[in-house]
Image: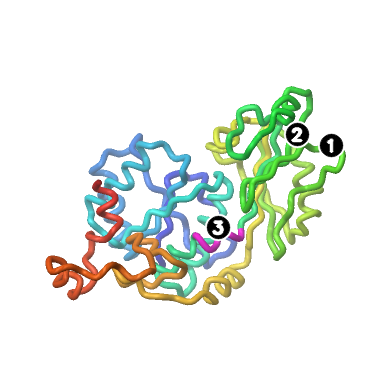
Amino acid sequence: MPTAIAVTSADLALPAPDRHTPPTEVLAGPDRVDLEGSLAELTALVERYGHVVAVVPSWLPPATVRRLHTVRAVLESDRIALLDTDLPPLATALLVRQLRQLAGCDFSPGVIASAARLLTHYLHAGALLGSVVRLDRVPVGLKAHAKSWAPGAQFAVTVHPEPRLARLGTPGFAPPPGPGFATHLTFARGQLPADWVTAELAAAWQVQGVLENPLPADSPTWWATHKLVEFVAAIPDTAVLHQLVASVRREPCRWCGLELIGDRCGFCAAPLLPLAPPGPATGAATAAGPATGAGPYHRAARS
């Protein structure tokens, strides 16, 4: 079975791009099940798939984040990875779908979990906003703040890979810099028309396709307005994603033994750098190999 990719909200489960992409596992939040129910749910996923990669956006309710970390700590399982992300909701959903695409390939669970940080670098995320009065995701100057009160004002905002803000229609306005590689543009409309996104932005970014999805429920809160059209440019092709990840050198995690790419294990959070030499009290445990449920992640979760 492929590695399970899990989320805590159904609107982060975008339609699969092909029949080979595994489905998203949607976890029930603490508002729907108690701790015992959450333990049973994740235990069943681990038993079914072997490993679970759960994406944990920074905008989740604190109670939901605490529940995930509590369940992982109680189960003492290095087969559950909790991946933090600061991406906005639609970009998070695209990242989740890319991880699902990788899960349908021949990659090990450790590579899939650690690939999330790599894939994030190739996402271009932003929104067309009708107001930036309450926006705190990018720096908003006094002039932009004042112009938000003008009727019909619209702002092109990108938050990843770098923050930018510009008001449409001002002298010298140009769409924000886009990706220098083939992408599809996915957008989700709130209470603004999407013409600028689907026409001007799509042309400026030279995307190969434009797709619409429903607006995630948390997007208006994330962008601090209902007057928005959220957009993300992302690599759509599974073969390209596979080649991108496969080209990166793999290393064994020195703590849990899983394969990883990059500089940190997605499952136990151990860095790629060698651990400090063990003292007399820990030498025997280290020599015996990775200890399930005792890695750096668990020490942090219980502190």
From the viewer's perspective, is 257 left or right of 146?
left
Query: Quadrant location of the N terminus?
Result: bottom left
Q: Nearer the viewer, residue 85 or 196?
A: 85
Q: Amino acid at mark 1?
A: Gly
Q: Residues within 10 Å of mark 3 (few under 14, many from 20)?
A: many
Give the magenta-colored segment's residue range.
117-122
Which element carries disc 2, helix, strand or loop?
loop
Q: Residue at x 37, y 64 (%)?
A: 271
Q: Amino acid at mark 2?
A: Gln
Q: Is residue 41 above or below residue 288?
A: above
Give the labeled residue for mark 1.
169
Q: Nearer the viewer, residue 158 or 74?
A: 158
Q: Is residue 168 above or below residue 269?
A: above
Label ID, residue 154: 2
Q: Residues within 10 Å of mark 1 (few under 14, many from 20)?
A: few
Image quarter of residue 289 = bottom left
**Residue 179 visible to an observer of this rendering:** yes
| Residue 283 image offset from top left, x and y in percent | 16, 71
Q: How many marks?
A: 3
| Residue 137 image offset from top left, x and y in percent | 58, 39
Give the labeled residue for mark 3.
120
